[in-house]
Image (cartoon, rainbow, N blue to C red):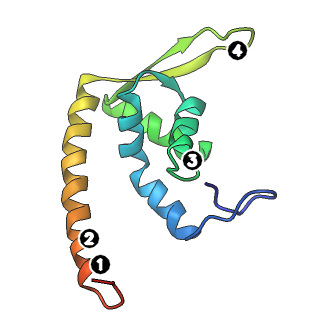
């Protein structure tokens, strides 16, 4: 899924709204993706894309990873490249696992409230 703003890209239903939701939930999605194993930035973006998360660009991805690293939620290390340059790989820390658990609970609470609002709004099929 992509935003449709670049040449040759598909239009995303919801366009700007989807991009906003991706930005708002990127931290949570990255923490969840790292529970499946250590990954470099491009592989994280690819993993999220494979799960139809939405467009994840480096300009959004790397600042979030840097912030998570500064907070101690992830750690990074360099991994030698196979026939190419090395890659910075990210791994979830214990603090990151705790943050993910807390953020998951807050996300569930938030989506429950939002779902209740949407279900009671006009135009919602009941």
- Helix, strand or loop for disc 3: loop
Numbered label attached to residue 56: 3
- Residue 10: x and y, percent? 71, 60
- Above-or-below relation of 87 to 49: above
Label 1 to label 2, Cα distance in Å?
A: 6 Å
Distance between the alpha carbons at the discs numbered 3 and 4: 22 Å
Residue 71: which quarter of the image? Answer: top left
Which residue is under mark 4? Answer: 85
- Secondary structure found at label 1: helix
Disc 1 to disc 2: CB gap under 8 Å: yes
Real-space Cα distance between discs 3 and 1?
27 Å
At numbered mark 4, what does the secondary structure look like: helix, strand or loop?
loop
Of labels 3 and 4, earlier in sequence is 3
Q: Which residue is mark 1?
A: 118
Provide residue 62's location: percent of width, then percent of height: 53, 38
The CA distance from mark 2 to mark 3 is 24 Å
Crowdedness near tag 4: few (<14), some (14–19) or many (≥20) residues, C-alpha within 10 Å: few
Circles 4 and 2, Cβ within 8 Å, touching? The answer is no
Instruction: Say which element carries label 2.
Output: helix
Number of the front mark, 3 or 4:
3
Q: Which residue corresponds to the image point at 57% horizontal and 30% vertical from the top-left?
A: 43
Q: Earlier in the sequence, mark 3 or mark 1?
A: 3
Q: Is residue 106 positioned above or below 38 on the image?
A: below
Report how far apart the C-alphas of labels 4 and 2 lie in the structure.
45 Å
Local crowd at mark 3 within 10 Å, few (<14), some, or many (≥20)? many
Residue located beneath label 2 in the image: 114
Quarter of the image where the C terminus is located: bottom left
């Amino acid at each position: 899924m992509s935003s449709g703003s670049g040449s040759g890209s598909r239009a995303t239903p919801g366009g700007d709204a989807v991009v906003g939701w991706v930005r708002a939930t990127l931290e949570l999605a990255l923490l969840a993706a790292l529970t499946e194993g250590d990954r470099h930035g491009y592989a994280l973006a690819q993993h999220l894309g494979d799960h139809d998360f939405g467009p994840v660009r480096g300009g959004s991805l790397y600042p979030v990873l840097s912030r998570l690293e500064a907070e101690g939620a992830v750690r990074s290390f360099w991994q030698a490249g196979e026939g190419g340059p090395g890659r910075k790989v990210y791994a979830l820390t214990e603090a990151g696992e705790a943050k993910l658990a807390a953020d998951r609970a807050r996300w569930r609470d938030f989506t429950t409230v939002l779902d209740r609002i949407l279900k009671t709004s006009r135009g919602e099929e009941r």
